[in-house]
Amino acid sequence: MRLLASLLILVLLSGCTNMRRLEKGKPIRSESASTILRKHLATNANPEWATMRMQVETQIDGESSSFKVNARLRRDSAIWLSITPALGVEAARIVLTLDSVLFLSKVPGNRFGYVGDYAAFDTLLGTEINYNMVQRIITGEAINLLDEDIKYISKVDGREHLLISKYKRRVRRLVGVKEKEINPQDSLSVEASPEVQERVMNRSDDEDLLVKRYWFDGLGYQLTRTRFDDLYNGRSIEIGHGGFEPEAGGWIPHRTELIIASPLGTQRISLEILRARYNKAYSMPFSIPEDIEIRKGL
């Protein structure tokens, strides 16, 4: 508790200093990557249980949808989702666990069940997804921020801190720019000749060619945006957070947008938390009736 209190005091003091700088029209003060990480971690809520009522907007394969979702989350265990469109009748129920996906469609004329893994989402969203990613997107926590083998360069981007993962020489050969020279708002793309691309790709895997960027509020150190540029597969993932509320011992974003751009197209999912309750356990009922067809995919 003393350590947490000390971290919170440091965040508040830094926030006051940067607020005075912003009031004078000056940029926020630059800080080391380790300092930014330490102050950010003090803002995480990490609730053991969460139940939320959310408004969800999607644009998948050119089709737009809008619906309400009741969500129940038990940290690092399971996420239960009940999807209700405009008419107010449950259309689908989903249970996500660490290694499995349970899905039940209740739509008349298209009733079916699915029991499988997260590969079912790959084609739908144009990227791989897993339980950890879903949980962190909902709670506003950074994905893969604390990987042991990743080091960061710290930059100031307006009123925000930006951490950019240091990448290997082979990435520089592909994109033609060093980490320190990246414009914060730029999308990274392969600029090398086809011959160089082929050589680099043959000697690399997905993680070798993944560039990570994380933006943090210059006053409160909440995570406001994440961007992954996957040069190996030619796609990007961007996650934006806003509307932070002090809840569950930290800060929870009430607005989140996920944008996935890949050779298959661009998919968007927007979440808005309408109400939430934390650290109270709820059941996660799920069953597939015997007369429902079980499909191999979604």
Image (spheres, rainbow, N blue to C red):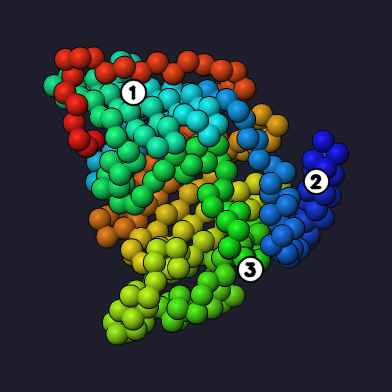
Q: Residue at x 79, y 40 (%)?
A: 4
- The image position of residue 31, as x and y in percent, is 74, 63
Looking at the image, can residue 54 be seen?
no
- The image position of residue 15, as x and y in percent, is 78, 50
On-image quarter of the N terminus = top right
| Badge 3 amino acid | Ile
In this view, the residue in front, 16 or 105, is: 105
Q: Quadrant of residue 5?
A: top right
Residue 93's label in the rendered image is: 1
Query: Are circles 2 and 3 on residues that touch, CB within 8 Å?
Result: no
Q: Residue at x 69, y 62 (%)?
A: 33
- State whether residue 59 is above or below residue 158: above
Real-space Cα separation, disc 2 to disc 3, in angstroms: 22 Å
Secondary structure beneath disc 1? strand
Real-space Cα separation, disc 3 to disc 1, in angstroms: 42 Å
Secondary structure beneath disc 3? strand
Residue 153's label in the rendered image is: 3
Residue 245 located left or right of residue 116: right
On-image quarter of the C terminus = top left
- The image position of residue 249, as x and y in percent, is 70, 32
| Label 3 or label 1, whichever comes before in sequence order | 1
| Label 2 or label 1, whichever comes before in sequence order | 2
Residue designated by label 2? 7
